[in-house]
Image (cartoon, grey):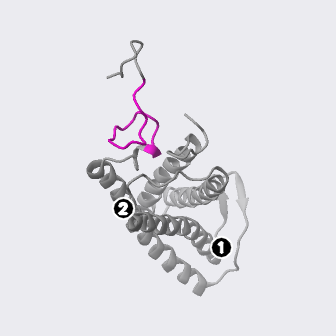
Amino acid sequence: MSLKNTADRWGGISQLLHWTIAILILVMAYLGLTMGDLPNGPDKIKTYALHKSIGITILALVALRLLWRLYAGTPRPVPGSPRWQERIASLTHAAIYLLLFAIPLSGWVLNSAAGFPLRWFGLVNLPHIVGESHDLHELAEEAHELMFWMLALLVVAHAGAAFYHHIFQRDATLARMLPRGWLRTDDATDPAPTPSSSGTPAE
């Protein structure tokens, strides 16, 4: 597997960052939707601390992925994709990137405005980025929740589009974000079978 992106598929580093961020988003969604109902106590404090640490991790990984994308480039559009689909996909990707920066930053503002400490996995103390403010805390909390639901909607649409391309259009949109051979498609950009020793295509 190539580490860098190629003209036809995402490389190993892009795939690793993509799926790591995706898994962390699912973990964050679960924590964010359940931790408020936990009884007050050490477990609730630990869960909130975990939520904050994962949020900072996502922020760092998204920044890394964007830098890698700028360095390694992006695959060309899947052949045969209508121009309007390419434009919608580009807008969706841009909105997801924007939210993946904005949501952790709004959480950081929320935490700082409340005067709570922020310690990444108990290892590194991170500074407050705003002063204590009840009004700012309330505003950041509302923005944090609203942007989460916006992200959830976009992620569902993004995943749904990928499965639509794979199941109905039978192209390599989904396959090229996975290791070679994990998915079979009818698209010409999907890797060709390895020839057998007899010179005929392998089954």
Image quarter in which the C terminus is found = top left
Which residue is label 1 attached to? Answer: 112
Dominant SS in magenta = loop
Q: Is residue 9 magenta?
A: no
Quadrant in the picture for residue 119: bottom right
> What is the tally of numbered marks visible in this picture?
2
Seen from the viewer's position, the closer of residues 203 and 147 is: 203
Distance in Å between CA atoms under marks 2 and 1: 31 Å
Dot 2: element: helix
Which residue is label 2 attached to? Answer: 156
Structural crowding at the residue carrying mark 1, measured as other residues with C-alpha within 10 Å and reported as few (<14), some (14–19) or many (≥20): many
Q: Give the farthest residue toward the left.
A: 168
Q: Amino acid under label 1?
A: Ser
Residue pictured at 57% horizontal, 57% vertical: 58
In the displayed structure, 7 sits above or below 106; it is: above
Structural crowding at the residue carrying mark 2, measured as other residues with C-alpha within 10 Å and reported as few (<14), some (14–19) or many (≥20): few
How far across and down, in percent of the image, does residue 106 sit? Answer: 58, 73
Magenta residues span: 176-194
Q: Amino acid under label 2?
A: Val
How far across and down, in percent of the image, does residue 56 sit? Answer: 61, 59
Residue 130 in the figure: left or right of residue 26: right
Q: Give the farthest residue toward the front.
A: 199
Seen from the viewer's position, the closer of residues 25 and 16 is: 16
Which mark, by number, is residue 30? none
